[in-house]
Amino acid sequence: MRFGLHLSVASGLEATLAQAKKMRLECLQIFSGTPRTWKQKPLKEQEAELFATGLAAADLRPVAVHAPYLINLASPKARLWQRSIKAMADQLRRARLLGADAVVVHPGSRQDKDLDWGLARVAEGVRRSLDLAGEGAACWLENTAGGGGQLGGGLEDLAQMLALLKGYPAGVVLDTAHAWAAGYDLSDQAAVSAYLDEVETVLGLEKVKMWHLNDSLHPKGSRRDQHTHLGKGLLGGKCFAALAGEPRLRDAGGVMETPKDTPQADPRNMAYMRRLRTLAQNRAAK
Ligand SMILES: [Zn+2]
Ligand SMILES: [Zn+2]
């Protein structure tokens, strides 16, 4: 697996790129602006171009922009849905300008509508966003913890949305903490292997464009989403050792969205995954 981090762009694109290079990241995720507001500051074209060139030169891949949390492409409310589509199209344009591969978005909440209605609503929202944004942008749907009408807790949800998006540049991102919260076991080698078998059957591994590597503070199936440092939560070290050594994920990107509670937190989580990967490689070479 290739390892990277979710980095804030609060101190500017240039600083973000410098930070990614300094930590020798192999893949990357960013917010292209503020994650909790509708209004997004326009990107400066020249700065964005320099960022895109820098990403390619640093061999960072994949690179994703995470959509702001207000976007709800499943919303039954016409106004919120329309606003979400516009905002998503804007994110797709921003991602293209920044040289990112795609925008990662949570499928959203269908409230009291039934499941099939919700899945079709999201697919229609994604199609409209992609049409508005034009060529060169892709949309990756992230799995969720599945609580409170959230779509995308089950792999079947994601498969159904992708089927409805046939012909469009769409893929999936799988978050370990969300999968666990939604009830999938990933706590050791056998569980990870069985989960990947299921991903292969239901989705196809080629549809998974990025992984989010997060440990979880809440039990399996709790539908509660709270990330913690890798190896320190209820998923535990065996989960991440299995992912780091999994041959099927050799070229996959794994982005950590772990707490940035101390300056050492990010470097420590990166070093942790690299160590597990080296151990697995040494074991395989014997
Ligand atoms: Zn997310
Ligand atoms: Zn995530």
Image: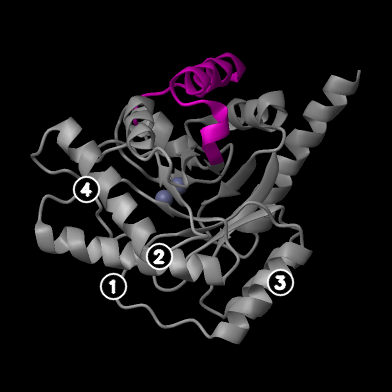
Q: Secondary structure at mark 1?
A: loop
Mark 2, residue position: 133
Identify the mark at residue 169; answer none if there is no mark: none
Residue type for callout 2 = Ala
Q: Quadrant of the N terminus?
A: top right
Q: Is residue 206 magenta?
A: yes
Q: Quadrant of the C terminus?
A: top right
Residue at horizontal 67 percent and vertical 25 percent from the top = 248
Mark 2 vs mark 3: give the one in front.
2
Mark 3, residue position: 53
Alpha carbon separation for disc pair 4 and 3:
35 Å
Residue at horizontal 48 percent and vertical 60 percent from the top = 135
Which quadrant of the view contains residue 11?
bottom right
Identify the mark at residue 74; answer none if there is no mark: 4
Q: Sequence-wise, which precedes: disc 1 or disc 4?
A: 1
Q: Is residue 219 visible?
A: no
Residue 84 x, y percent position in the rendering: 25, 62
Residue type for callout 1 = Trp
Mark 4–mark 3 CB contact (< 8 Å): no
> Which residue appears farthest toward the right when viewing the image?
286
Q: Secondary structure at mark 3?
A: helix
Mark 2 vs mark 4: give the one in front.
2
Residue at horizontal 53 percent and vertical 16 percent from the top = 197
Q: Sequence-wise, which precedes: disc 1 or disc 3?
A: 1
